[in-house]
Amino acid sequence: MAEILLFHHAQGLTPGVRSFADDIRAAGHIVHTPDLFDGRTFPSIEAGIAYIGEIGFDAMRERGVRLADDLPAGLVYAGFSFGVLPAQKLAQTRPGARGALLFYSCLPISGEWAFGPWPAGVPVQIHGMDNDPIFVGEGDIDAAREIVEKVEDAELFLYPGDQHYFADSSLPSYDADATALLTLRVLEFLNRV
């Protein structure tokens, strides 16, 4: 059994994010799903990003990072898109991380935007669609490939399609087949960390 801290995407803690967490719980894992937006959800990625911009990207990321203070070490950190920011920072900087699951986004481990090198012994999976204009078009795939190249236990899984939030069953971007495969891979990962 693993204990996971799962951060939602820019549209908020949607029913689809909750459903994904419930599927992981049904397999016997503990999943924490904090709501960084205090109950708000947004009809589009753009509206959610605008809200994050009002608060400040760094402030919102740090809000997520601080939530880990009340939880034990030895967590798997997971995030959907914007939620990758606090998840990846915690995986890279909080001692005791058991793993990281990065969905639709990835930050580099070198250069200006990096939190530093990837810590030894922390496995990571990165999932995205091969024609996602955000994951591919904005360069996250390059950061993911850098991690896979430099980190011993790192995997990048690409799914056919062009949707960003493809594993959120409450949104029009949902892809049931890709989500089923993603969930299977995540459960295999959680069972070995």
Image (cartoon, rainbow, N blue to C red):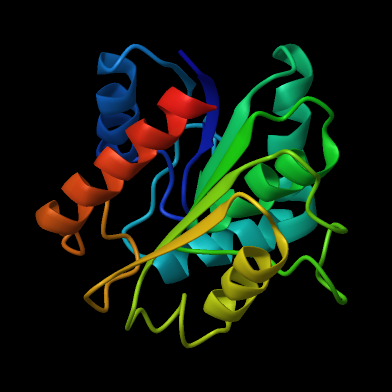
Q: Residue furthest front?
A: 152
- Answer yes or no: is residue 138 visible: yes
| Residue most extreme to the left | 177
Picture layout, residue 154 above or below residue 173: above
Judge by depth and name the residue closer to the eye, 109 or 8: 109
Q: Nearer the viewer, residue 50 or 135?
A: 135
Residue at screen point 84% across, 41% down: 93
Task: Spot the residue most to the bottom.
Answer: 137
Percent position of residue 168, x then y = 26, 49
Residue 129 vs 138, above or below: the answer is above
- Quadrant the N terminus occupies: top left
Residue 20, position in %: x, y?
29, 35
In the displayed structure image, the side of residue 139 where residue 128 appears, left or right: left
Q: Quadrant of the C terminus?
A: top right
- Camera-side residue of 140 and 146: 146
> Observer-nearest residue: 106 or 188?
188
Instruction: Residue 53 in the image: state x and y as whole percent.
Output: 66, 64
Rendered position, 108 above or below 20: below
Q: Say above or below: 144 vs 51.
A: below
Taking the image as shown, residue 112 lies to the left or right of residue 172, namely: right
Residue at 26% across, 60% down: 166
In percent of the image, x 67 and y 60: which residue is there? 54
Relative placement, left or right, of 158 versus 78 is left
Q: In the rendered image, which quarter is residue 18 located in?
A: top left
Q: How many numbered circles are shown? A: 0
Q: Residue at x 87, y 76 (%)?
A: 112
Q: Position of residue 40 (x, y in %)?
A: 44, 41
* Res. 91 image quadrant: top right
Is residue 34 visible in this depiction of the protein? no
